[in-house]
Image (cartoon, helix red, strand yellow):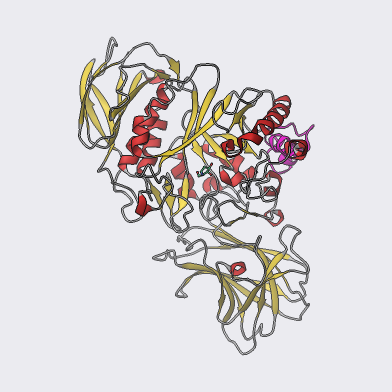
Amino acid sequence: VTVSVSATASHPIPTTLWGQMYEDISSGDGGLYAELLQNRAFQQVTPGTTASLNAWQAVNGGGISVIRETVPVSSALPNALHLTIPSGLTGGVGFANTGYFGIKVTSGSTYTASFFYRFPTASSFRGPATISLQTNSGQVLASTTVTLSGAQTAWQQVTVQLHPTTTPGSTSNRFVITLDGAAAAGQVVNFAMLSLFPPTFKGRANGMRVDIAEALVEMGPSFFRFPGGNNLEGQTVATRWQWNATLGPLVNRPGRVGDWSYVNTDGLGLLEYLNWCEDSGMQAIMAVWAGFALGGTSVAENQLGPYIQQAIDQINFVVGDPTRSAPATLRASLGHPAPFTLNYVEIGNEDFFASTSYIYRWRNFANALKAQFPNIHFIATSNTFNPVLSPNPTEYDVHVYQTPTWFAQNSFFYDGFQRNGTKYFEGEYAAISTNPNDLFGTPANGRLVFPTMQSASGEAAFMTGLERNSDIVFAAAYAPLLNHVSGSQWTPNLVSFDSNTVYRSTSFYVQKLFSLNRGDEYLPSTLPSRTGTLFWSVVRKRSTNQIIIKVSNTAGTAAPLTFVLPFGTVASTGTLQVLQGAATASNSPTTPNAVAPVISALAAGKTFNYNAPGFSVSVITVTAQ
Ligand SMILES: [NH3+][C@H]1C[C@H](O)[C@@H](O)[C@@H]1CO
């Protein structure tokens, strides 16, 4: 096929075009959020149940249970770990935490451990507690001691640093606290709000896991949508995500039962999200809860007031003036007096599940929030123009989970949209299954566990259409972004990880190739066949006089292209980055690097040929002017 490129740009590429959708779906706690201890504060668990001791183990005969404390460490954390040292034991006696399916320990890194303790009954005991990192077989990797005093009946926080001098062969390691069995026989000690942090991204306190953060930043994303997604919504109104419950000292954060069947610590809270956006060069696309819980409850119109106020306060926490707004004063007191960047706020999530009530929920939220924040764009989440909403949304968030073939066949999805001022956020999209009749089914029935070259090239085809239509598509994000392979709630994901390693998928590389080569204006060219299997888009990066051609071949056979560039001078050599593999080629824990982009030189010029390999995504960069 011959592709003639126009020298006259049709429209600028919005700077927000490629970014990330995030929610805690086996992705925050135990993942992006760097806390290494699972169930660290016994949040939202029933004392005495097996679940209450999830990830905790007795060591050498220590008696442990989770209790409802009579003197809780805080009103937010009513539970504590109750340790009894039986008589007749010697050596270290206590408890351990096994992390989120393991704890990675790296020699040379400094780990910060902290906990609160108190003796529920005063005692004359005074002796060492040993705090250590150990392999599951008992090899001590790092250790230190603190003195515990039986006179300490009020909660006392202890913070220590651990410096492992060896790197164990696996992540089968534990965080261990023990007392001397002989010296502490008969003692009873309560512990609360235990924590173990490795080094974090940019050294942020309470921050992000470095290798995951670096993988996300590597894509060059422009925005970060949070906190959801379903995990914004709650199964009930009471268990919705609430911004004000996720701030301040960890000991004041109650956590919540998230929407993906596990407790969220909310250690990764609103301020951590906002600091992360600044640290990673992304702007927030922040959601506010909009009166619908996933269990099916829509708040009645005449009862929306408090929830609208909570949304106003949430936005004021982000952008308000500390001298005029209490939430902004709180932001300043937490260390960020300046407002954060916030241009987009999404009202709800996937409200096509509650369209009827969204008519009044949108009306009440949008009118109230626009009045307070006239410079912020508010994004609607129902189906586009159905139902008709008032005020007319300036942006809609469109989600699609489909087959690789659907994405290849729908790259013209937005070409037919009216240019009526409305803009679109392709807020969640992914090729999720090869079975159009059971998209959300099991792997045995076509569901993808990890992205493949077939799914990634289908997405790339669709993305060439998003680029062509980026006069009305201002943002797009693959979803879900991230998941722990040992605790998945959803597959496939863009980036997977276990406690040791981050796995970059084929779709990750497609997102990275598009994002890092986004250009700043779109150059029209010969249109691909809507029903074909070969797709392309052309952009120009003015600052470097580069023409950037993206090609997706969604078929198994190579496809020849001829490019005709109408520029006065065109370099005779260009750069080619190509991602290719068999249809089912996939990066996963068993084959982590099966597919990665390969860079090479390419013969270019005013007219040049390129043979796109089967199941490939290519980026050709040529200097021209
Ligand atoms: N059901 C999907 C749609 C919802 O918005 C997300 O939480 C889920 C996974 O990305």
From what the image shows, is residue 587 above or below residue 402?
below
Residue at 25% from the left image edge and 43% from the top image edge: 582
Quadrant for residue 367, please give it: top right
Q: Is residue 549 visible?
A: no
Name the residue nearer the viewer: 430 or 467.
430
Q: Is residue 156 left or right of residue 279?
A: right
Name the residue nearer the viewer: 2 or 77.
2
Residue at 37% from the left image edge and 48% from the top image edge: 448
Indicate the position of residue 371 as horizontal and vertical percent values.
73, 25
Q: Is residue 159 magenta?
A: no
From what the image shows, is residue 32 above or below residue 87?
above
Q: Quadrant of the N terminus?
A: top left
Name the residue nearer the viewer: 569 or 449.
449
Magenta stretch, overall SS:
helix
Q: Is residue 382 visible?
A: yes
Q: Residue furthest bottom?
A: 88
Quadrant for residue 562, please give it: top left
From what the image shows, is residue 78 above or below residue 573?
below
Indicate the position of residue 304 as horizontal and vertical percent values.
74, 37
From what the image shows, is residue 173 above or below residue 210?
below
Indicate the position of residue 102 as horizontal and vertical percent values.
47, 63
Indicate the position of residue 269 as horizontal and vertical percent values.
63, 47
Residue at 20% from the left image edge and 35% from the top image edge: 557
Quadrant for residue 536, please give it: top left
Q: Is residue 550 left or right of residue 286?
A: left
Residues in magenta, as a range: 310-338
